[in-house]
Image (spheres, rainbow, N blue to C red):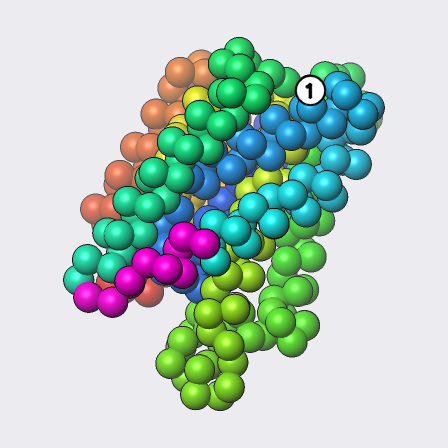
Amino acid sequence: MGTLVSLLLLGLMWGGVYLLMAQGLNLIYGVMRVVNLAHGDLIVMGGLIAFSLFHHAGLSPLLALAPVFALLFVLGLLIAAGVLERIEEEGPRGELRTLFATFGLSYLLANTSFLIWGGQFQSIPFLQGALVLGPLTLPEGLAAASAAAFALALLLHLFLERTLTGKTIRAVAQSPLGAAASGIAVRWVRVFTFALGTALAGAAGALVICLVPFQSASGPDLTVQSFTLVALGGLGNMLGAWLAAELLGLIEVFAQYTLGPDAATAAFYLLFILFLIVRPQGLLGQAGRV
């Protein structure tokens, strides 16, 4: 019984980390209808910045969250205002143009990371002990990263639900034309949303690098994993992304325990393929969205 409870808790904690990885991508798609193929590279860059802050300034990953968030937010502003908002999105090839732009951005970020940090794997030795709760033993690093991820997810939810800026973001996501007719500066909201999604990706990287080593070329795998979560939950649906993240965490932990590490990833992607066949709109998405 103790083993089952431990596996459940581990799966839920990993789900919190995966949720933070996917939230930025989900937020950007929900407002801008842009699939950011550079999302994983932004996660890697955030993690490697946290790595540098840890080794050169002595900042723990939790303390590094704030500067990483701020730096990636500024980078997101520059990308959105300087590149994405200058691309013509009207017409049948509009989404294809943004895909090409973010695809090129992925290579630019990956090579920039390679020039700064090299090609070797990097990690942060943070909270490597065990947290003992009666008969349960849980990794301290995972528990801290999961708690921080859930806290950021809650703050994002409160920001979107309770603040005026958050409500304008939701209005643009629901109807850009209606938001513009109401006097909302849609272009500013889109730029701000992309910057916020980029900052969330960086924050996710600062936490995940404590659990999984990163190198400059790790971005595409993280992009695929994040996009799979978003698509499984329903594109643009925050609650669906949370459910999908928890599902991934549980499947991965139980599959690793029973079948081995190689089978864990395969099990989740097989489930994803099954969903594409049976319910292509995702867990909570609307029909025709995916």
Q: Residue at x 40, y 77 (%)?
A: 175
Q: For residue 105, what is the image quadrant?
A: top left
What's under tag 1, amino acid-wise? Answer: Ile
Check the image and report above or below for 145 versus 260: below
In which image quadrant can residue 235 be found?
bottom left
| Front residue of 23 and 43 | 43
* Image position of 257 (left or right of 223): right
Residue that extends furthest to the left in the rendered view of this protein:
92
Identify the image quadrant of the C terminus: bottom left
Q: Is residue 85 magenta?
A: yes
Q: Quadrant of the N terminus?
A: top right
Residue 3 appears in the figure: no
Magenta span dominant secondary structure = loop
- The boundaries of the magenta stretch are 82-91
Q: Is residue 34 above or below residue 200?
A: below
Query: How many dots with numbers?
Result: 1
Residue at 67%, 55% in the rendered image: 154
Q: Which residue is mark 1?
A: 124
Image coords of residue 277 (percent x, y): 21, 46
User: Where is residue 54 drawn, in percent x and y?
Assistant: 75, 24
- Residue 182, visible in the rendered structure: yes
